[in-house]
Amino acid sequence: MKRILSIDIETYSSVDIKKSGLYKYVQSPDFEILLFAYAYDNQPVQIVDLAQGEKIPYFVLMDLHRPEVEKHAFNAAFEFYCLSKFWETRIEQWHCTMVHALYCGYPGSLDAAGKAMELPQDKRKMAAGKALIRYFCIPCKPTKTNGGRLRNYPRHDKGKWNLFKEYCRQDVETERTIKNCLDKYPVPEHEHYLWTIDQAMNIGGVGVDTQLVHGAIAVHEQVSSQLKSKAQEITGLDNPNSVAQLKEWIMENSDLEIESLNKKTIAELLESDAGGDAVQEMLKIRQEYAKTSIKKYTAMDAAVCSDGRIRGLLQFYGANRTGRFAGRLVQVQNLPRNYLETLDYARELVKERKVEALRLIYGNIPDTLSQLIRTAFVPGEGCRFVVADFSAIEARVISWLANEEWRLQVFRTHGKIYEASASSMFGVDIDLIKKGHPEYALRAKGKVAELALGYQGSKGALIQMGALAMGIREEELPDIVSRWRSANRRIVDLWYSIDRCAVDCVKTGKASALPKGIYFTRDENYLMITLPSGRRLFYYHPEVHPNERGYDQIWYTGVNQKTKKWETIETYGGKLTENIVQAVARDCLTDAMEHLTQAGYRINFHIHDEVILECPNSSTQSLEEAVRIMCVPPVWAEGLPLNADGFEGPYYKKE
């Protein structure tokens, strides 16, 4: 049996880790490790004061790279990368307790996880930690009181330093206690392997066109200054960017009564041509302000390392309800789409900071900058991007899980699910649903139904998905819901089967199963749903209570995705179906990532169901091969009709 070495470290760097990320933080020339706390198995925690000249024992340094010793830490990516700057250690020998907590449905911070697990106070993270980190781990502001120094050392406050050592020691205790509590529900070995792939991807990073980034920031500053001056001229306000001041000005200078100035309200006011010329002009300026995404450029600028690459864009298992990845730093999961046909020319104008040319050709400069954000990601010298993504992955997965045969046949052949859905819903030959035919209007209804109704959504889901904006009348929505459900009876059956299995499992404790390898089990802590891949989804402290209509409904404790708090959450068949489908789609992605890695492809990053590969121009790697690899279903998903498509190019974009 392997020995367990639990580790926590405290460090110093002049780089802001929150803005710039772990990798730039560690690569700073002034980075150093201040404290090293460790413990073997359940032995007492030891603390090494590196800042005051103590040395890590030689046997510990040797164990950092011995495969027979497992290294554990909460957010092990941090400890691994920091220690690897000075000593030899291998990522496959590390295990991340944070990932383990996320896997089991707990929060992803040491403090929040300890509280959620209701650990005794002496096993929780110390509350004084944040203040001590601010004091010792980041630069300080020079003042007369501190003698003008830029950094606090242990000698400047020995009492705080001793408390800081205790804080570091306590973190090992907390991490180890959490690990011991979760050992009953181990992270599958395959998930650990996928985590090592994720770490290699994050460490390698992706190139950034810094000339484009700096050009975009400069263009934005010039345009913002011009827009502000114009707004001040129109309104007479000192700060026309203030929503409160602008709302008041609009109401004083028109007969309008407005509660907000969000994008939707501004668009509606502009469309109605309300308020007069001055108000309309000001609303156009406000709308132009709102379209800019300069924060993405400034985030890139803050995070880019000295070699021109950004690292650490994704968090493994960041969405603990499904196991999907979460965005970090630049938040690549919500990049604006691009529609410009002349991306190359627009990029050059921004690099050269030609504001007037941009305005003349493209009109709305902030919108143009937003569309160019994706193109700031570039491959390294001598390489090109190969970008491949799954087509309609969630629609394919839910069809496969439900065994909705007509849909599976669509995906095995032409793949036009919006047209096929409209055809099935309205009894119209699919060949008539094409441009130039009056029946083509039905495609919009098929599309919005596909996007909104797969997880037991109804009229409200259609509205939220933009049905009204598509020109569909509100009185038509109930009919669309009814027709879609009638056309997809096996998917509807899947919702209710999942709901019934989950409720019965929580109430009786008896295991149950559905086709495709989905199992429901529970113990004293969790409702667990086993996926076709063998991975499990966890719902902590499940209970069943009647809802307002008297039907049984499941409640569990978890991180609320909206409030980000640990609290009681309700769920139902459609929502559980969504969790399962998205989790299976995630497993398809990680399966593809695994096989692409084994085939020698270098993954720079990925977004939802799309992988961005950096391929040497001299290699035989190709889009066709990458797509072929992605289209092979996992061994546990026989009959799942996967499809993928993509492009090759000198920068990232949305095709």
Image (tube, grey):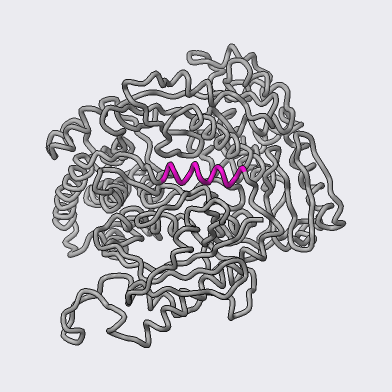
124 or 296: nearer the viewer: 124
Bounds of the magenta segment:
190-202
State the image coordinates of residue 20 (x, y, percent, origin top left).
32, 56
Q: Is the magenta stretch mostly helix, strand or loop?
A: helix
Residue 488 in the image, given as x and y percentages of width and height: 72, 30
Q: Residue at x 22, y 51 (%)?
A: 278
Quarter of the image where the N terminus is located: bottom right
Q: Residue 195: say if magenta.
A: yes
113 horizontally vs 35: left or right: right
Task: Check residue 638 for magenta coloring.
Answer: no
Point out residue 292 in the picture as x, y percentages from the top left corner.
Answer: 29, 46
One can see residue 1 in this view: yes
Q: Nearer the viewer, residue 291 or 212?
A: 212
In the picture shown, does residue 9 fall above or below 96? below
Relative to 529, 63 lies left or right: left
Q: Where is residue 438 in the image (x, y as percent from the top left)?
A: 54, 17
> Does 646 sit above or below residue 220?
above
The quadrant the C terminus occupies is top left
